[in-house]
Image (cartoon, rainbow, N blue to C red):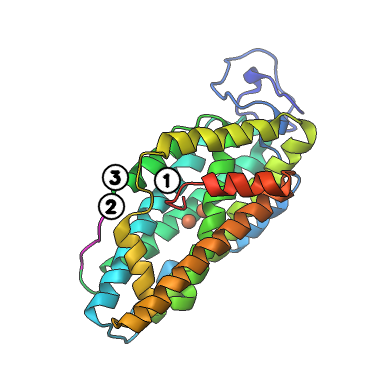
Amino acid sequence: MDHPPSDWGLAARGALIESGGPRTPFDITHRDLVWAEIAPSLYSHAASAQWNPDTEVQWNADFTLPDEIETAVVQVMTYLIENEQAALVIPAQLLARIHPHFREVLQLLAVQAADEARHMEVFTRRALLRRGEMGTSSVSGRESLATLLGEADFSMASFLLSVLGEGSFLNLLEFLDKNAPDPVTRQVTRLARRDEARHVAFGVAHLQHQAELDPSLRSRLRAAVERRYSALVDTSGLNQDVFDSLVILAAGEWTPQAIGKGYDAVMKLQSEMDDGRRRRLVHLGFPGDEAADLSALHTRNFM
Ligand SMILES: [Fe+2]
Ligand SMILES: [Fe+2]
């Protein structure tokens, strides 16, 4: 049903429901606000693709890294954990607001939250693996994530988090997989990336579904990006420690020549993130020039 009544509550879809009874607090009750045709099959795929952090990662792999490289890994993991926490809390909050009649969407978001819980776990274990200490968290990073947490509209939150943020993270995780200095870092980023691809796919599919039915959606998405950009305009963007760590990981060693190469690799990463965002925006029906403008306004914190 497109708009199930509030007093259907938690009844199973398809049950013969006795009329009356208490109203429920779910405020997202229209099918088109949450649905995507791909949701049931994406849920089945997600359920079958769950992995065990204990056995899928070789935690006791034998490796020793130079101090500055280990510091860079720890810093990047610290940053990833903070972003994963936002990626867990946001779908969990949205899930609890959706009418259970659209159960596949709830199931999909529940597994998505479980994915993020695993990402938090493996990144935390890698961060603490050698030294038992975390890196830094910056105000600018937390400001960026606060604007995501404050987005009350399901479609806007899904757009900012899944299409733009997690979309950019696909490139970041690929970069970390490629430049990982040890097998544990490589395995945890590779496993997380596989899950993230599903999160992005649902965000894009659901917004595409909605854009077809509601021609005003794109202007609202545009406004959400611009609003977030204005809120963050006075912040410094990506934590400088994270930027430097990405450069060092791509450099692989502490020499001026290698650092130059690492810097170029991080510039290339940022341009690949931009390409990916523009491609997804065009997929949602934005003309190319508008997609480029919007991608450029995306938070420099990546998420
Ligand atoms: Fe994640
Ligand atoms: Fe995710």
Which is more toward the observer, 230 or 100? 230
Q: Is residue 154 left or right of residue 133?
A: right
Where does residue 144 sit, x and y in percent of width and height? 40, 43
Q: Which residue is drawn at 53% across and 56% down?
A: 168
The residue wearing badge 2 is: 137
The residue wearing badge 1 is: 86
Where does residue 80 sit, x and y in percent of width and height? 39, 58
Span highlighted in magenta in the image: 132-136
Q: Give the mark nearest the N terminus, 3 or 1.
A: 1
Q: Is mark 3 on a helix, strand or loop?
A: helix
Q: Report the predominant secondary structure element of the magenta stretch.
A: loop
Q: Which residue is drawn at 44% across and 77% down?
A: 179
Which is more toward the observer, 67 or 90? 67
Q: Which residue is drawn at 47% across and 73% down?
A: 265
Badge 1 crowding class, 10 Å Cα cut-off, few under 14, some 14 to 19, many 20 or more, is: some
- Would you place residue 140 above or below residue 222 in this image? below
Badge 2 crowding class, 10 Å Cα cut-off, few under 14, some 14 to 19, many 20 or more, is: some
Where does residue 92 sit, x and y in percent of width and height? 48, 40
- Camera sees residue 252: no
Residue 139's disc number: 3
Q: In this view, does 74 lie to the left or right of 184?
A: left
Q: Quadrant of residue 218?
A: top right
Q: In which quarter of the image is residue 150?
A: top left
Amino acid type at image mark 1: Ala
Q: Give the mark nearest the N terminus, 1 or 2.
A: 1
Amino acid type at image mark 3: Val
